[in-house]
Image (cartoon, coloured by chain):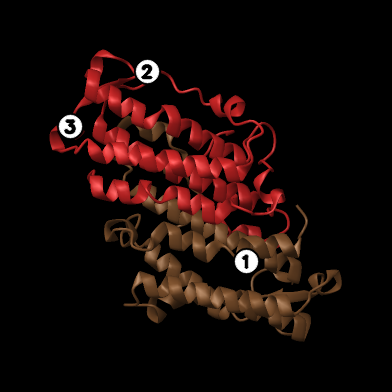
Chain colours: A red, B brown
Amino acid sequence: MEQNLEQTLALLGRTPSVLNALLRDLPEEWTTRNEGGDTWTPIEVVGHLVHCERGDWLSRARIILESGETRTFDKLDRLGHLKESAGVPLAGLLDEYSRLRAKNLEELLAWNLGPAELALRGSHPAFGAVTLSQLLAAWTVHDMTHLHQIARMLAWQYRDTVGPWSAYLGVLHCTGHSGS
Amino acid sequence: MEQNLEQTLALLGRTPSVLNALLRDLPEEWTTRNEGGDTWTPIEVVGHLVHCERGDWLSRARIILESGETRTFDKLDRLGHLKESAGVPLAGLLDEYSRLRAKNLEELLAWNLGPAELALRGSHPAFGAVTLSQLLAAWTVHDMTHLHQIARMLAWQYRDTVGPWSAYLGVLHCTGHSGS
């Protein structure tokens, strides 16, 4: 569907409470195990979301508004959260994610973006020209990517425990994410 | 990981509040659109979860405890919810899901299941012998399958809106579910 700022904000605004409902106080066996090898754990995904909330989506939107295509976005450090949030307990990460998201959406709302601003272009280090509308949609789908990933991570812990039911459970057959 | 009833209950107990945080009062553009063709919408997924909560998982667990392998489970009508919940608003479905899940987990807890009961076997119409432990794990992973699916359905609505970011967003490349 077309970019609709009200709909985008409605979904962006609720991701912190969704992850809070899913992960806060969940036994550590669910939240600290990964999918094998160097994959992430649910706690690391929340750390990554905090990291993106601090320096990625809204900062890039601001660059588009201020500099258009003349200033290429900084590259995102996809492993930045591993240093930044090492040792921070899950509850603290969830609190921080919720706080930063609320603050970011407040700023976004205050910009009063209309169709002209949404069509403004910026320069992505890998893709080249992107619009502000695409960036806001990608922010939203990035939330869904990680919710989707966390559901898969939790399911993965019981991949053998379900026995023959595995065949019927789509989440155990998802290949939509790379190693992390 | 091994079946652990406390951990299973911790996850089963929170799915209604996760879906509530994600879907209640979300604009209809997100909740009433499907992924094309005869796929389901998020509202239909919640209807399916209500349907399963009414007649599937706990009923089958009860059959294992009462009759073991001598009574094959009834087949689940995967489209049963379409009649049952047609016209019921999303808020009503979420309320019903939450009420039924709480009631079912209360009954499950009251059974005081130990290792001997978890190892009991029942007869699945497609797989044959399954254990009560496998059934409880599958119930949990079934929740995660549908959370995973709903995240994908929501993301799908913005699949074109994200422009070139599509390449980086794993949820747009998930093939873990069939048509529904």
Reading the image, the residue beneath label 1 is: B139
Q: Position of residue A48 (x, y in %)?
A: 53, 34
- Horizontal and vertical percent for residue B70? 76, 84
Q: Chain of mark 3?
A: A
Q: Is residue B152 above or below residue B76?
A: above
Q: Residue at x 69, y 67 (%)?
A: B136
CB atoms at circles 1 and 3 under 8 Å apart? no
Is residue A176 toward the left or the right of residue B130 in the image? left
Q: Quadrant of residue B44?
A: bottom left
Residue located beneath label 3 in the image: A117
In the rendered image, the quadrant that contains the C terminus of chain B is bottom left
What residue would you read off at disc 2? A125
Q: Viewer-nearest of labels 1 and 3?
A: 3
Q: Which marked residue is nearer to the observer: mark 2 or mark 3?
A: 3
Residue displayed at 46% across by 44% down = A98
The amino acid at mark 2 is: Pro
Q: Point out residue A151 in the picture as x, y percentages from the top left corner.
A: 56, 51
> Is residue B76 visible from the viewing direction of this image?
no
Q: Residue at x 68, y 43 (%)?
A: A32
Please determine whether, in this image, residue B149 is positioned above or below residue B80.
above
Q: Going from the N terminus, do you reach mark 2 or mark 3 first?
A: 3
Badge 2, how many Cα within 10 Å: few under 14, some, many 20+?
A: few
**Number of residues whose C-alpha sits closer than 10 Å to that of mark 1, classed few (under 14), some (14–19) or many (20 or more):** many
